[in-house]
Structure formats: structure tokens, C-alpha cells
Image (spheres, rainbow, N blue to C red):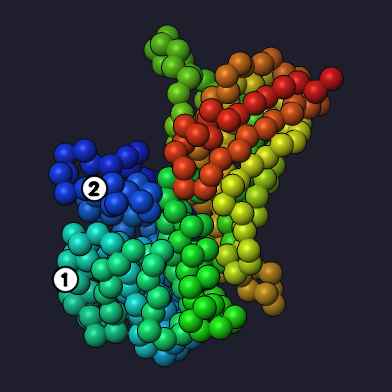
Amino acid sequence: MTHAFDFPTGPDMHNNAITEADNLLGQYIPLHYHFQMLEDEARMSGFKAALDYMVPTGGTVLDLGSGTGVLSFLAAQKAGRVYSVERQPELIECAKELLIENGCGDKVQLELADARDYLPPEPVDVVVCEMLHSALLREKQLEVIQTFKQHYREKFGDRLPLFIPDATILGVEPICADFSFQGYHAPISFFEDPGLLSGRYRSLGAVTPYCILEYQADFPTRLSYDGPLTMTESGRFNALRFVTKSLLAINLKTGDSIDWMNLNLVLPIKKPLDVSAGERFHVRFSYEAGGEIQSLKNSIEVARER
């Protein structure tokens, strides 16, 4: 499945109730932006299919960073109990009303808590955590899951629950981007829908994976690449496209997976280069998962291999 997922670019600066602590898990997402997530049919159908496949009938589910509670609702269609954790009081109140309205208030236990600190009172079968931003920036998906696994093992032993997503694959691709708008040259960072790629932003080479993160396994929180990109097309190499694909669920028997594609992140490089098919370039970047987009952009280095 190919999915697009839109995020706001930063906190709602008009909301005086937002504190620095509210942003510790990443960007603050105001309530009205959650409608975009609910309306995204591809995102919703992907998580619904993954929950249908992964959650055992009558099982127990933990939803970390549950927002309006929609993934808790989907989990409750099969689960016997769902612990739904959210640190924003505004969202907790909204989720409470919506879950009751949708007939599963008795199955879903809402918890006002930091997802990094919360532990359920009992072992769970499945953990769903959707704090996924392009290139795993901005939101603290890796930090939340890493600390959860540590605390869960301390309380319940080494056997971990299943995770949704099961894994995330990060890739990078050289492109030729048309940054001219009515004659105004503006090479700035932007997001693009992977299902609606424009001819203005042309691929010059294959997507090269730079990190594969399996959530049940140990994983780094410093993400980086230091290697070659080979051009398969000629053109003006002036930007990198960062691709983020999450495997929400994997059928080990068939090898099939339920996938979700975040919005691509396109970052201009400092010095555009004219390239020919077959040329190789050395690309280096490094950033902390959950960090700001600018931290990744500032770290990018590109050099023609000789």
C-alpha cells in the first residue's frame, strides 16, 4: 500500500497552554490537524488492516501517543482491552467523547501520561505507536519505543509484545528539482506525496536505503549515511529526496507486508551539480531521530567521486 500522511510544520504559537514539556515528544499537533489524519483513507486503511491482522481476538493492546483515539478504536474491534496513552489533556477529552460515541468506551482505558514513562498494569500482546514523521524527524518514535522496551522488560521479563509498525525503512534519492516559481528561484525544503509525484522533481538515481529499523530489535537513534549514490539519469543534481516506508505488519509465511509511506521530504543541497548518467557521488549526512529538519539539512555533504 502507498500512503500519504500530512503533518503541520510546527507548534500552534497561538495556544498559550503549550509548554516546552508538551513538545518533548516532538512537534505539538493541534486538534484540528488530527482531522487530516482521520481523513487520510490510505493511512487509516493501512493501520486498520495491520491491527486486524496482528491483534488476537480478546487480546490486550497498548496505543502510545493515541491522539483522538482512532487507532485504539480500531484495535478494540478485536481486543478485549486497550490502554490508550496520550499526554495532551485536550486530546484525552476529545478521545473520551469519541470513544463513548463509537461504542467502545468500556474497552479502551484512556491514560493521561507521557508515552516514554507509561507502563500498562499487565503484559500486552500488541503495541501500536504512530509517531512517524518523514525520515523519523520531529517526533520521538524511536525514543518512545526504546524506553518502553527497557521498562517493559524490567517489569514483565524479556518477552516483548508485537509492534505496529514492525519496521521502518529509510532511503535517500538524488533528484533534479525545479525550484523556479514564476521566475522566482526558491530552493527550500518541502514535503511531497509519494503517490502524486510531480514531473517538476525528477529522479536522477535509485532510492538507496540508509537505515532499516526493526522495532523488536535494538536500533540506533543516530541515523546516518556515508556512501555513494549513482546517477542513472543526466541533469542538474540539486536536491535529495528522503523516503520513509513503514512495514506496519509482515506475514512471515508469505512475505507479504502492509506498508505505509510517509510524505517524502525533499532537501536542497548546498551546491547544485551538473551530472551525467553513470557518475557516482559520495553523500554523507547524520542526524538524531526526532530532531529538527534543519539538523539533517545542515549535515548534508555531497562530493563527486573521482
Residue 269, x across and y down, in percent = 58, 23
Q: Secondary structure at mark 2?
A: loop
Residue 52, x across and y down, in percent = 46, 77
Q: Residue at x 75, y 21 (%)?
A: 304
Q: Is residue 77 above or below residue 297?
A: below
The kind of residue on which mark 1 rests is Glu
Task: Mark 1 or mark 2: name the one nearer the start of the chain.
Answer: 2
Contact flag, marks 1 and 2 (Cβ < 8 Å): no
Using residue 60 as the reference point, say whether residue 198 is left or right of it: right
Residue 33 can be seen in this image: no
The kind of residue on which mark 2 rests is Thr
Residue with the mark numbered 1: 97
Using residue 211 as the reference point, say whether residue 93 is left or right of it: left
Outermost residue toward the front in this view: 154
Residue with the mark numbered 2: 19
Q: Which quadrant of the structure image shows residue 59? A: bottom left
Q: Which quadrant of the structure image shows residue 182? A: top left
Residue 70, x across and y down, in percent = 31, 67
Residue 51 can be seen in this image: yes
